Image: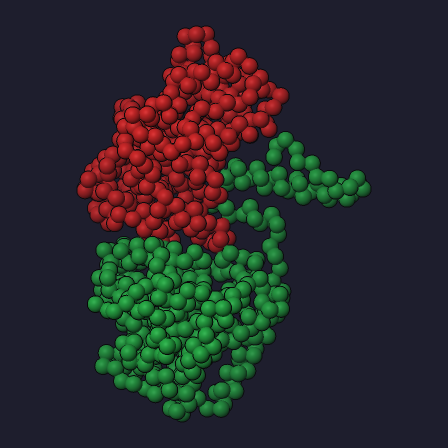
Amino acid sequence: MNEPTPHAPGTDAHGDHQSDQALDMIQLLDHTGQLTAHPDYTPRITHLDADALRRMHRDMVLARTFDTEATSLQRQGELALFAPALGQEAAQVGSAWALRPQDYVFPSYREHAVVQARGVDPANILRIFRGIDHGGWDPADHNVHLYTLVIGSHTLHATGYAMGLQRDGLVGSGDPDRDAAVVTYFGDGATSQGDTNEALVFAAVNNAPVVLFCQNNQWAISEPTTRQSRVPIVERGRGFGVPSVRVDGNDVLACYAVTLEALERARTGGGPTFVEAYTYRMGAHTTSDDPTRYRSAAEEEHWRRRDPIDRFTTFLRSEGLLTEEHTDALAAEAEALAVRLREQVRAMDAPPTSSMFDDVYATPHSDVERERAWFARYEASFADAAADGSGATASEGAAR
Amino acid sequence: MSIERVSLAKAINLGLRRCLEGDPTTLLMGEDIGTLGGVFRVTDGLQKDFGPDRVVDTPLAESGIVGTAIGLALRGYRPVCEIQFDGFIFPAFDQITTQLAKMHYRSRGRLQVPVVIRVPYGGGIGAVEHHSESPEVLFAHTAGLRVVSPATPADAYTMIQEAVASPDPVLFFEPKGRYWDKADVDLDATGSGLDTARVARPGTDVTLVAHGPTVTTALRAAEAAAAEGTSIEVVDLRSISPLDTATVAESVRKTGRCVVVHEAPVQYGTGGEVAARITEECFFHLEAPVLRVGGFHAPYPVARLEHDYLPSLDRVMEAVDRTLST
């Protein structure tokens, strides 16, 4: 039985930080960027060649470029809001790299690096934050479901989808190009939601091929993880009888290895896995948030020294895998992405007003159609009034 | 034609059986629906014939039932969820109104979630708390959901099949107090659509609008009124969302008087919506204000009092007398 944690995770009563070892988590790169051997997980990364490691690094850097650019666009008034993923690039890119094309992702709303690494044009994410789209992309294009904003709701959708894969005979068939699994992303706060707990129940009793990937970024807006749980978050998965593992969420290689194992278990019929990726939300909850009201500069500094991109960059450099040439090329690619995002976002127009009546139902619904027709007449009345110069009085009529 | 005299519960059972036979993607999910056949036996025998992967006994968690049904629908299945009793739907309220109702809209039509949620509802069965409620308008108030309620075995048989076939999510409210009422059902019937009301009994003096369990009450009222020389037209709404205003309005233009009857509380209820629409559309045909008869603005009472809470034949007749005396 674990002792309750009475203080902010990663800290003791005096705000001093626990060592990474004390957290008992899987790590393949320590926070100085040195490889550390793990008997179970090191073998899962040995196949990653120089090119793969560089592309992983690229995905992390471009995710941060996206984050920085989106935050700027919000400050310029081009976006209504933005929720940065700053600091969570290793957890997201590492886990996304473990996916196969046939796997399916159910993200929360901060999984920009996952979505981007999966192949969705990141500009589409910004359609949501510009206020012109609730969705942003076609889920079928890259097997990435839409963002879900209500915390934890989508963990059940992921579990149900996984139950569908079982019924489709796509689990444990022995064909690695056919067998599929589902990953759902959520945060530490979501582990308090009933839906997340019900997802664990349904996943467990159905042995569903789903990986429940919790990014414990230490903060649910202003509330530390201690306001969600008196035991380490990973224990919650174990309580449901689901194999559960805590991984250093700022170690992209460990996140990759752990997710790879979990997905393999799922695809081969071994059922669900709960992953706690121990990481940190380096930025604000959203651009409307002010973290200085609830956390210390010392804590932020502690985690800045554990920046997942810095760690991986240090490792690649020390291995001689990241030359100046590579770095320059990546910087140019990042700048090009930023320019493209700026241009695309500024060109994104609001949809026509009448589109608010579109797709409410898949088949015509007389109440929606009546209101659509009324609204069209109402709008047309202004044009008619302008045409005959009689002023802008709209007649609502009895049919409203 | 293959006519069989069956109860409303059996009619739904037969309809579900046809769905399971006709489409391998149809699944039934719910608490106690498999081995037991459901607490009302609506799914009796179906797990035996279609197996536990298609007639699924789920964990006891309503949000989990609907949430996983959404995921299954996204994977191409057509799940039919049973919520054991009306008062147990609220743990799933968020998944229904926030997720299920909006999926097609927020994906701009790219995602369809053809989930049916069956809800035994209504009172009159002497049950304990939370087992007799009528929450249908809570869902009719939410865009993206279709909300229907059959009143007869024949409608129950076809409407459940139409609900399963619908690409939209459907809340299917089953009048549990009428589960054992028997009537002839044409097993070859294909139904008249989920969107339309029907005139259950023609008349000329007063329009009585009802749905689900109160259609029978309205028909009894019409019978009683006929003995006194009053001709009542009974309109069975069948659908609450959409609401077939045209059929009700056509009737009221003829009768000039309208009384709406439902078990759900009158306050902010279907009756208020019907009254507003009829007032707008038939204002100059109305001889009297539209009246409402239904539950009170009080929690559903103890079973020994429910017959005074529910819209009884006497209360319906009282409203009919009132509208005629205006």
Examine the rendered structure and indicate whether residue B300 appears above or below residue A70. above
Q: Residue furthest front?
A: A14
Depth check: give the residue in front, A284 or A262. A284
What residue lies at 50% left-to-right and 39% top-to-bottom? A365
Q: Residue furthest right?
A: A389
**Direction from residue B303 to residue A305 in the image, left or right:** right
Question: Residue A320: horizontal and vertical position, in percent?
Answer: 40, 92
Examine the rendered structure and indicate whether residue A56 appears above or below residue B191. below
Question: Residue A265: horizontal and vertical position, in percent?
Answer: 25, 67
What residue lies at 36% left-to-right and 46% top-to-bottom? B92
Examine the rendered structure and indicate whether residue A110 appears above or below residue B231. below
State which quarter of the image contains the C terminus of chain A. top right
The count of marks equals: 0
Note whether residue B197 is visible.
yes
> Chain B appears what colour?
red
Colour scheme in the image? by chain
**Direction from residue A74 to residue A84 in the image, left or right:** left
Note whether residue B203 is visible.
no
Question: Residue A315: horizontal and vertical position, in percent?
Answer: 38, 87
Question: Residue A259: horizontal and vertical position, in percent?
Answer: 31, 71
Depth check: give the residue in front, A230 or A322. A230
**Direction from residue A83 to residue A193 in the image, left or right:** left
State which quarter of the image contains the N terminus of chain A. bottom left
What residue lies at 24% left-to-right and 60% top-to-bottom? A240
> Chain A appears what colour?
green
What residue lies at 48% left-to-right and 24% top-to-bottom? B292
Examine the rendered structure and indicate whether residue B121 appears above or below residue A273. above
